[in-house]
Image (cartoon, rainbow, N blue to C red):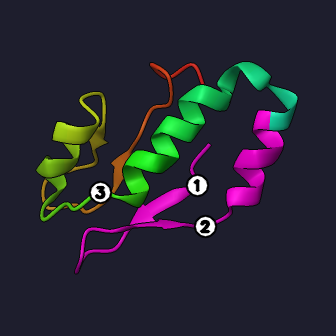
């Protein structure tokens, strides 16, 4: 599930539809802690370049050289 994308200019994460995440958590209560932690980290992140995301989320996958798109795994890609 991809809910986020990263703006090129300020490296902030823009939540596209948090309601989708909240509905998922309601159906899969075991995911709540992982999603809450993930949401908190991206809310306060201060990244200057895509590589900085790897410092916050070591399992993040940067998509291609020069790309500002990143795949973020939740709870070791369990969600």
Asked whether, in this view, residue 17 is left or right of residue 14, the answer is right
Quick one: label 3, few (<14), some, or many (20+) residues within 10 Å? some
Q: Which residue is mark 2?
A: 16
User: Taking 12 as reference, is 23 above or below it?
Assistant: above
Residue 45's disc number: 3
Asked whether, in this view, residue 22 is left or right of residue 42, the answer is right
* Nearer to us in this view, 64 or 32: 32
Q: Quadrant of residue 55?
A: top left
Q: Are marks 1 and 2 in contact (CB under 8 Å)?
A: yes
For the point 45% across and 19% down, which residue is it?
76
User: Taking 38 as reference, is 43 above or below it?
Assistant: below
Residue 10 lies, in percent from the top left, at 24, 77
Disc nearest the viewer among 1 and 3 = 3
Q: Quadrant of residue 28?
A: top right
- In magenta segment, residue 63: no
Q: Which residue is mark 1?
A: 3
CA separation in Å, label 1 and label 2: 6 Å
For the point 49% across and 37% down, which residue is it?
37
Quick one: label 1, few (<14), some, or many (20+) residues within 10 Å? some
Q: Are marks 1 and 3 in contact (CB under 8 Å)?
A: no
Asked whether, in this view, residue 22 is left or right of residue 67, the answer is right
- In magenta segment, residue 16: yes
What is the span of residues highlighted in magenta in the rendered image? 1-25
Q: Element type at marker 1?
A: loop
């Amino acid at each position: 599930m991809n809910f986020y994308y990263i703006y090129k200019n300020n490296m902030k994460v823009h939540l596209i539809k948090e309601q989708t995440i909240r509905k998922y958590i309601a159906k899969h209560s075991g995911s709540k802690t992982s999603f809450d932690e993930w949401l908190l980290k991206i809310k306060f992140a201060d990244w200057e370049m895509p590589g900085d995301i790897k410092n916050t989320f070591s399992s993040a996958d940067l998509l291609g050289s020069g790309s500002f798109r990143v795949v973020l795994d939740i709870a070791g890609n369990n969600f």
